[in-house]
Image (cartoon, helix red, strand yellow):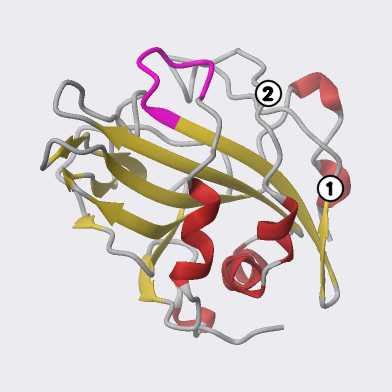
Amino acid sequence: MLNLSKPQEFNCLASYVLEMVNAVKLEQLQPFFEFLPADPYLAGNYRFRNLSHFQIAGDRLIQLPHRQLFQSKAYNPILGDVIREYPELDDRLVASADFQKIVWEFFQFCQLCTNFNEVAVHQIRTTASSQQLGNPAPEGIHRDGVELVGIFSVNRTGIEGGETHLYPEKDSRPAFSKILNPGEFLVFRDSQYFHYTSPVKATTSELGVRDVFVLTCPGLFPPESGVGEEEKF
């Protein structure tokens, strides 16, 4: 297993961690965001998304069979109670060493803070034009309903905004506010913080983009799927 950080410094009960993952070559990941399909569940054609799930078995990263995404309205007032389908990540991306470094890095925190050995990886591009803002979090300030969340920034081009905030309470002042620069990885416990990322605005006449991986431990599945319990250690 790669030892890219010091997860023992992470307080699972009350803290978050922001780190720069220098071991990842971002230029190897950026091309895989160019052909993401549009998210069919949001109007405006400004968000693009793939989703895959992985199980960690010893020192092996195993891609799991295709799974659907589900959140209740308690967590997602926009798309809650909707069973969503997204394509899997590109096989070449999954096989790349730089992508696997990100998953392993996040899994170290999962080991420390949870009993799960399953990770969901959302590959998301948010775009903005001179006519339209891009909204990375249309559901507003929210929790996801998982144990841990990680946001890894791959690319920001031609945009302003997109500041990520963590809130101890939904109506409180943020405990953390920062634009995540490429290579930065924010990890936090979902039950301790609500989170939100502000809209992005294009800074030129060209299309602006924000590319991230959002990782969760565990994934989010329809309740009748029976998925989840078997993924614990």
Residue under the point 42% across and 82% down:
22
What type is the residue that disc 1 sits on?
Answer: Leu
Question: Magenta stretch: dominant SS?
Answer: loop
Mark 1 secondary-structure assignment: loop
Q: Left or right: 165 with respect to 203?
A: right
| Mark 1 Cα-neighbour bin, 10 Å: few <14, some 14–19, many ≥20 | few
Q: Name the amino acid type tagged 2.
A: Glu
Q: Mark 1 and 2 residues: CB-CB less than 8 Å, in contact?
A: no
45 in the magenta segment: yes
| Residue nearest the observer in this picture, 50 or 144 | 50
Q: Nearer the viewer, residue 200 or 13?
A: 200
Q: Give the residue at x 36% y 37%.
A: 126
Query: Where residue 102 sits in the image (x, y, percent)?
Result: 57, 68
Residue in front for this viewpoint, 148 or 99: 99
Q: Write down the residue under mark 1.
A: 64
Query: With respect to residue 163, does 42 lie above or below?
Result: above
Q: Is residue 6 above or below residue 170?
A: below
Q: Is residue 58 above or below residue 143?
A: below
Can you identify the residue that label 2 sits on? 85
- Secondary structure category for the residue under label 2: loop
Residue bounds of the magenta highlight = 39-47
Q: Residues within 10 Å of mark 2 (few under 14, many from 20)?
A: some
Residue drawn at x 20%, y 38% is: 206
| Residue 114 badge | none
**Left of 23 or right of it: where is 226?**
right
